[in-house]
Image (cartoon, grey):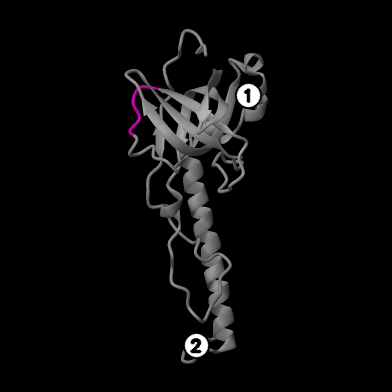
């Protein structure tokens, strides 16, 4: 490897060397993070069912899709606990191939995920990304503000609560001698995701 003169930070060769080194480091760390995430996501969530209806289809014809297996995900809007189960309202997002919701403002609508038992609102907080698999159990009608709305309801079998995005980005200070296209996304995730065992089976789907 050629010797790089480090005494002058404006040396073009030093700048090029630092850019190349940081790019390679970013690629390596991003790959490690991706492999770590894939190893912890339940296999039931890594791939969508062969016939995975989308949210707008279920909203339009809930009877047709009741009992159908789906894999959906998105961003938590609210959570409501009752004595026997928890309802989580989710703004649906398109999913990456590995199952994580895209970080985007585009959405096909909202749905309700029903979980057996208690989920802590401090953990399943507004803004967290979540992916679920389960069966379509019907629809639920109500209002968002003054707007009438219909939510598809999914009875959850498996789910994955993704690490908060703020934990996956470190704001490294920019330095004048390099500009790296991976900056600031060379990271190791700091928070641990939540993986849950399958919910116990129900004798009949929810009637709404």
In the image, is residue 185 above or below residue 53? below
Which quarter of the rendered picture does the N terminus lie within? bottom right
At x 43%, y 46%, the residue is 163
Magenta-tinted stretch: 116-120
The residue positioned 34% from the left and 35% from the top of the image is: 121
Q: Using the image, determine if residue 184 lies above or below residue 163.
A: below
Residue at 50% across, 8% down: 204
Q: Of 128 and 59, which appears nearest the observer?
A: 59
Vertical placement of residue 206 versus 76, above or below: above
| Res. 197 image quadrant | top left
Find disc 1 in the rendering and name its residue: 59
How many C-alpha atoms fall within 10 Å of the one at disc 2: few (<14), some, or many (≥20)? few
Magenta residue check for 68 = no
Please tell me whether the stretch drawn in magenta is mainly helix, strand or loop.
loop
Q: Residue at x 43, y 56 (%)?
A: 188
Q: Nearer the viewer, residue 192 or 62?
A: 62
Please identify the residue farthest to the top as the structure is shown: 203
Q: Could you tell me which secondary element the residue under label 1 belongs to? A: helix
Q: Position of residue 63 (x, y in %)?
A: 63, 14
Q: Is residue 81 visible?
A: yes
Taking the image as shown, residue 187 lies to the left or right of residue 119, namely right
Q: Which residue is mark 2?
A: 9
The percent position of residue 72, horizontal first and vertical second, equals 56, 32
Q: Whole-percent x and y of residue 158?
A: 47, 27
Q: Secondary structure at mark 2?
A: loop
Neighbor class of circle 1 (other Cα within 10 Å; few <14, some 14-19, many 20+) is many
Count the marks: how many?
2
Is residue 54 visible to the viewer in this orientation of the structure? Answer: no
The residue most toward the bottom is: 7
Rendered view: 7 above or below 94: below
């Amino acid at each position: 490897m050629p010797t790089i003169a480090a005494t002058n930070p404006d040396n073009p060769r030093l700048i090029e060397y630092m850019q190349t080194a940081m790019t390679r480091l970013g690629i390596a760390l991003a790959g490690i993070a991706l492999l770590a995430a894939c190893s912890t996501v339940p296999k039931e969530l890594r791939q969508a069912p062969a016939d995975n209806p989308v949210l707008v289809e279920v909203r339009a014809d809930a009877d047709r899709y009741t009992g159908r297996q789906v894999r959906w995900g998105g961003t938590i809007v609210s959570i409501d606990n009752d004595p026997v189960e928890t309802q989580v309202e989710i703004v649906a997002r398109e999913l990456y191939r590995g199952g994580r919701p895209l970080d985007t403002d585009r959405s096909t609508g909202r749905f309700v995920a029903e979980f057996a038992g208690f989920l802590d609102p401090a953990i399943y907080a507004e803004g967290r990304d979540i992916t679920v698999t389960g069966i379509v159990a019907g629809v639920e009608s109500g209002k968002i503000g003054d707007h009438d709305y219909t939510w598809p309801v999914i009875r959850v079998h498996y789910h994955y609560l993704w690490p908060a995005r703020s934990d996956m980005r470190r704001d490294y200070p920019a330095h004048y001698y390099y500009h790296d296209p991976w900056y600031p996304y060379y990271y190791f995730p700091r928070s641990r995701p939540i993986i849950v065992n399958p919910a116990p089976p129900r004798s009949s789907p929810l009637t709404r």
